[in-house]
Amino acid sequence: QHRHLLELLKRTMVHGESNSALIIGPRGSGKTALLNHVLKDLREMKQVTENLLELFMKNPFLSGLLQTNDKVALKEITRQLQLENVVGDKVFGSFAENLAFLLEALRKGNRTSSCPILFVLDEFDLFVHHKNQTLLYNLFDISQSAQTPVTVIGLTCRQDILELLEKRVKSRFSHRQIYLMNSFDFKQYIKIFKTQLSLPAEFPDESFAQKWNNNVQHLSEDKTVQDVLQNLFHHTKDLRSLHLLLMLAVSAVTVHHPLLTAADLQEASRHHRTDSKANIVHGLSVLEICLIIAMKHLNDVYDGEPFNFQMVYNEFQKFIQRKAHSMYNFEKPVVMKAFEHLLQLELVKPLERPSVRAQREYLLMKLLLDSSQIMDALQVYPNCPTDVKQWAASSLSWL
Amino acid sequence: MPNLEHPAYPAADLLHLESLVPCRESQVSMLLSIFGERQQFSFPSIFIYGHTSSGKTYVMQTLLTTLQLPHVFVNCVEYFTSRLLLEEILIQLQSSSSDKEQTCPVHCDTLNDFVRLFKQAVASQELQDQTLYIVLDRAEQLREMEANILPAFLRLQELTDRNVTVVLLSEIVWELFRPNVGCFEPFTMYFPDYSIGHLQKILSQNHPPEYSADFYSAYINILLGVFYMVCRDLKELRHLAALNFAKYCEPVVRGEANERDTRKLWKNIEPHLKKAMQTVYLREISSSQWERLQHDGGEPGQLKGLSAHTHVELPYYSKFLLIAAYLASYNPVRTDKRFFLKHHGKIRKTNFMKKHEKTSNHLLGPKPFPLDRLLAILYSIVDNRVAPTANIFSQITSLVTLQLLSMVGQNDQLDGPRYKCTVSLDFIRAVAR
């Protein structure tokens, strides 16, 4: 893919061809990295081939996150092309006129020939949501008509991006797509792990670098480390999470602890994989845990249908009257306050927005925790009264 | 003995830091190891989550100010639109750089301008490549703002190409934050809740100087024994501790018991704490009212909480109307004949009813009923004859205005207006007395 992109851009630079392409790949598959790499290569190449005409490469880097509508995008393009003083106070009738004017100005500025412009659009799918897709239309239009050599490269993570384009925009697009998939297997993954961790040759302290790299080699053959990496590999293949994990492990390295150990990696992995909702459940008070158990029983009995506060309170009352020895029978407002705390933590979510008409107690809700999550969390819950635990395990079946 | 050690920061600072953040040493040491030295790049975004009042904001602020790391601290509830938020960040950046210059008003509408102005502002300060921390408190509000704010902040290091780390603090877990198309995943960190031992330790730190620490710890023990099952929130417990301590010390002050007489103190304070659970904990009465009550030694029956104020005095017919509305909402239509007529026939239980007996109406909420049914029930419960005058109808409308009844459906329904009763059984019982 690297070669493909390089070819494309070279053709724009050298031959003055206009092109467009889309780079598609899931998050963290290295699209931006690829592009930067190619651009670096191009710059080096430009210096090599001096006999070409004075080609002036500018690349306005536009990101879909920042330029949220076309006017903003156009202003940003103007600014990056440093043409602000030229545009000045002119008022443009339409977007296309504006863009054409910019390109004209650029051409005149260079006198010999028009310089090729490379447009890089990051988060391409966000540009697609603009009104009428005017920016995209105009850019692709210019890339098809042969005035100035323009290359438009879009980076996106949505696979169905072509369906989102309007018909007229799609027809002007050259349908060149470059797909980036993380298609390496586990052995290559381990190799990547090694290369990421190894210190480069230019590291000042030679002996330490040597020791470090030996340690890395040793680690990559260790069984526990391989287990950890295998776990991560099965979960997600992208390199960003590997990077996160390694950074966490490396941050544990201090003066007293100069070499990375397998335990560090295990600790980092454990940290990375904790179930966050279980953590939150760990911190709830006993009353709130009882409410969650009541909701779990309701879900079991009614097969996941939404419930409201009154039903939960009823269930709780049943438990208190029949089985509880350690729980004091709290009053309804106190239980309501505990329930509202659960709402605030978003463990319970209402099905629709609360309106003025409906009373708060009868609003239908659903629980955002799985029953296995609840049981696991109860195992580690500190100081849980035994009858509460038993209530959770048994389903009080009567009717 | 300092637990926190880091080569980049002076040991005296770290010791001071440790004294300020009890029971949170492991989190602080993890944060320090992630931050690294001042010039080192850190994770582009960090997401810290934990329960209410588990110390997230406090620890971040103390850490950043004690070690004097350059930072910007913004609360997303206070600056709830994107423009307010971005402008506030830029203003704080400007003010932290030089205090002699006035802060010129910053106009920043979009993220695009923000990135540009941010780069300018960072360049103008003498940061020397130190990491700048932008801390956004109550980050769950970011989800409500424009859709591009959250992903942009997560990638700010990449978009601005500077050494900046964004720290997001929230109570809600990260899975509920993730936008649909995915985003740059931050480093998530959990601040665990305080255990009961920790709570005791922290609460005992604020003991007033007149009494001994042991005495105060015993008091905290009792308080936690009553309230721990219900609430683990440090702020609320501290509030309750401060309010009730005077009452606890009363026997000692009056000379009836000395500090060690735990049984007497317990007997004195126990009903008081139970009462506190119903009132101050629920914020039914304010703390000043509570203190006044303690001082006067008034009877508990005189306590009128906030919800008690809704027991408005209703005129005679309105009370009956309300009770009739409650009966109409919660009894199914089939049973009306049985309850309200003098000579009623037997009701045959059909299969249909057997299946639907399970979900009691009390659980599902009130059902709407037409006006005629309301009047019919009213006539049957009021002893003397009631004429359908305009008086009655206007009382119905005033009940709707008081939101004790609510109108269901459009104004121009052909069958007549339908209503629903919106008060609970306790209220009805109180009215019926």
Image (spheres, coloured by chain):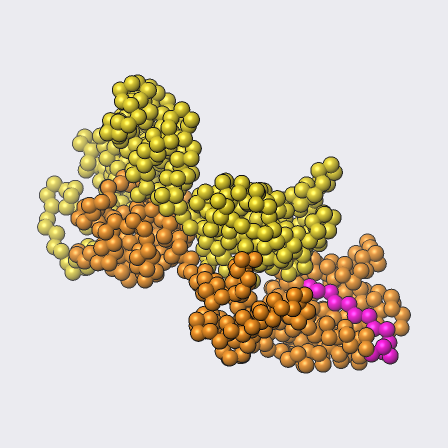
Chain colours: A orange, B yellow
| Image point (73%, 77%), residue name | A9
| Image point (73%, 36%), residue name | B100
Residue A157 in sight: no
Residue A176 appears left or right of B50: right
Q: Position of residue A114 (x, y in %)?
A: 84, 72
Q: Position of residue B238 (x, y in %)?
A: 40, 35
Res. B251 image quadrant: top left
Residue B287 appears left or right of B259: right
Q: Position of residue B338 (x, y in %)?
A: 14, 46
Magenta-tinted stretch: A49-62
Classify the position of the C terminus of chain B by image quarter: top left
* Magenta: main secondary structure: loop
Residue B372 appears left or right of A141: left
Give the camera-side residue of B392 and B45: B45
Give the camera-side residue of B309 and A215: A215
| B17 w.r.t. A144: above or below | above
| Image point (15%, 58%), residue name | B350
| Image point (24%, 29%), residue name | B263
Res. B296 image quadrant: top left
Give the camera-side residue of B186 and A173: B186
